[in-house]
Image (spheres, rainbow, N blue to C red):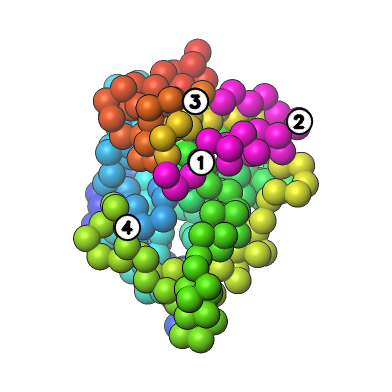
Amino acid sequence: MINPDPDAGTIALGDGAARRTIALLGRPGGNPGLFWLGGFRSDMMGTKALALDALGAERGLAVTRFDYSGHGASGGDFDQGNISRWLEEAEAVFAQTSGPQIIVGSSMGGWIALLLARALLRRNERRARALVLLAPAPDMTHELMLPQFTPQEHEALQNQGFIDQPSQYADTPYRITRQLIEDGQNHLLFGSVIETGCPVTILQGGQDPDVPQAHAIKLVTHILHDPVTLTLIPDGDHRLSRNEDLARLRAAILALLD
């Protein structure tokens, strides 16, 4: 079991310039464990992650949280981050857990959750008890980012290798790199059946400016062999961090436990 001491909760990955230290927090407890995958530029101390940890404490369940490289308390350069790297980190942290896990992914974390579940299924490692996805953003590099870039941003992306976009979630702009976009091509899920090997629950805000509800519906149409429940929250935003949203997350997980 992962040491719950944040100072001891680290693992090292990669070699040379790719080496980075991943910070993680593990709450000891029973199974199924709760495994958190945050979104782009978020960290394991966010509202939803803390709500998940509180639920684990209440129910005596193991909870695992971590920060991707370049995020939160983890080392590494954010500008070197991409889906391949962050997925590798998710798999490495998941390997520190034991027994069945309910994998909870938010936004980009929803994409990584789907990729992680697929990787586990291909290895016949059936430890994904269920997926709970909040405003999931599979294929976000090509479905949600690229189509929104202006001609000037496309040009800057090619010429300087990055663009900086204002964000309503931070005081500083979000940097989007060309290598992030190019790497995303290697992990696209739409266009073929998405296999998870477990039930999937999706919570989606109807007022989400970043991941429109049509994206969640498109995801549902690609999951053909596993049970899927989509809950549309008409007045919900992208974060889904209001008290009523956290109550829905809690209810979704409790339903899977029951």
Give how far apart the Cα atoms at labels 1 and 2 are: 24 Å
Label 3 and label 1: CA atoms lie apart by 11 Å
**Crowdedness of circle 3 by 10 Å Cα count: few (<14), some, many (20+)?**
some
Which residues fall within the magenta stretch? 209-230
Q: In which quarter of the image is the N terminus?
A: top left
**Which dot marks residue 69?**
none
In the image, 219 versus 22, the foreground residue is 219
Q: Is residue 157 visible?
A: no
Answer whether residue 82 is magenta in the image. Answer: no
> Measuring 67% from the left and 56% from the top, which residue is drawn there?
188
Check disc 4 and report the residue beneath it: 167
245 sits to left or right of 102: left
Mark 2: few/some/many CA within 10 Å (<14, 14-19, 20+) = few
Q: How far apart are marks 3 and 2 (CA)?
A: 21 Å
Q: Position of residue 169 (x, y in %)?
A: 29, 52
Q: Where residue 212 is drawn, which disc sits there? A: 1
Question: In what element is the residue under mark 1?
Answer: loop
- Front one among 194 and 137: 137
Q: Mark 3 points at which residue?
A: 232
Residue at (32, 57) in percent of width and height: 167
Q: Residue 155's spot in the image, x, y percent?
A: 52, 80
Q: Depth check: give the residue in front, 76 or 94.
A: 76
Residue shown at 56% from the left, 63% from the top: 146
Q: In which quarter of the image is residue 127?
A: top right
Amino acid type of the residue tagged 3 in the rendering: Leu
Residue type (three-letter) at the residue carrying disc 1: Pro
User: Badge 1, how many Cα within 10 Å: few under 14, some, many 20+?
Assistant: some
Residue located at (47% from left, 80% from top) = 156
CB within 8 Å, label 3 to label 2: no
Q: Residue furthest bottom?
A: 159
Q: What residue type is labelled 4?
A: Ser
| Residue 43 in the figure: left or right of residue 189 | left
